[in-house]
């Protein structure tokens, strides 16, 4: 499984994906207009993605431990408009 963020760029109105395991510690750039997400915000986003991935991994492990617990997975979405 992979954790992916769908990022909307309001500079050019395009969306792109960023995977949790993508190397690099700097800012994330829009591949369409090259607008850059500041590195401190990109790092916070990466931390959030790692926590999200770990939580889903824990849910899978808990479900597979033989207790008959149903499997759950959660995704995060931002709703509403800018």
Image (cartoon, rainbow, N blue to C red):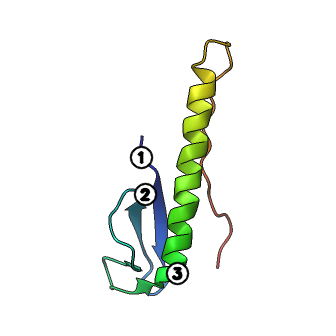
Percent x, y of residue 77: 62, 58
Q: Quick check: 58 left or right of 24?
A: right
Marks 1 and 2, the one that precedes in the sequence: 1
- The residue at 47%/62% (across/down) is 6
Q: Position of residue 1 (x, y in %)?
A: 42, 40
Q: Mark 3 highlights which residue?
A: 40
Please state the total of marks drawn on the protein image: 3
Q: CA distance from mark 3 to mark 1?
A: 22 Å
The answer to whether marks 1 and 2 mark residues whose Cβ atoms lie closer than 8 Å is yes
Quadrant placement of the C terminus:
bottom right
Q: Nearer the viewer, residue 5 or 65?
A: 65
Mark 2, residue position? 20
Label 3: state its secondary structure.
helix
Q: Is 32 left, or right, of 54 in this rendering?
A: left
Q: What element does badge 2 sit on? A: loop
Residue at 56% from the left image edge and 45% from the top image edge: 54
- Of badges 3 and 1, nearer the viewer stands 3
**SS of the residue under disc 1:** loop
Query: Going from the N terminus, do you reach mark 2 or mark 3 first?
Result: 2
Where is residue 8 shown, x and y percent of the image?
Answer: 48, 73
Residue occupying the point 62% across, 33% down: 59
Q: What is the x, y in percent for residue 36?
A: 41, 85
Nearer-N-terminus badge (3/1):
1
Q: Which mark is residue 2?
A: 1
Give the distance between the C-alpha atoms of the residues marked 1 and 2, in whole angstroms.
7 Å
């Amino acid at each position: 499984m992979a954790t992916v963020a769908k990022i909307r760029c309001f500079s050019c109105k395009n969306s792109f994906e960023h995977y949790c395991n993508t190397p690099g510690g700097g800012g994330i750039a829009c591949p369409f207009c090259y607008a850059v997400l500041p590195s401190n915000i990109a790092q916070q986003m990466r931390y959030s993605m790692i926590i999200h991935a770990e939580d889903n991994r824990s849910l899978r492990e808990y479900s597979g431990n033989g207790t008959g617990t149903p499997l759950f997975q959660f995704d995060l979405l931002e709703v509403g408009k800018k």
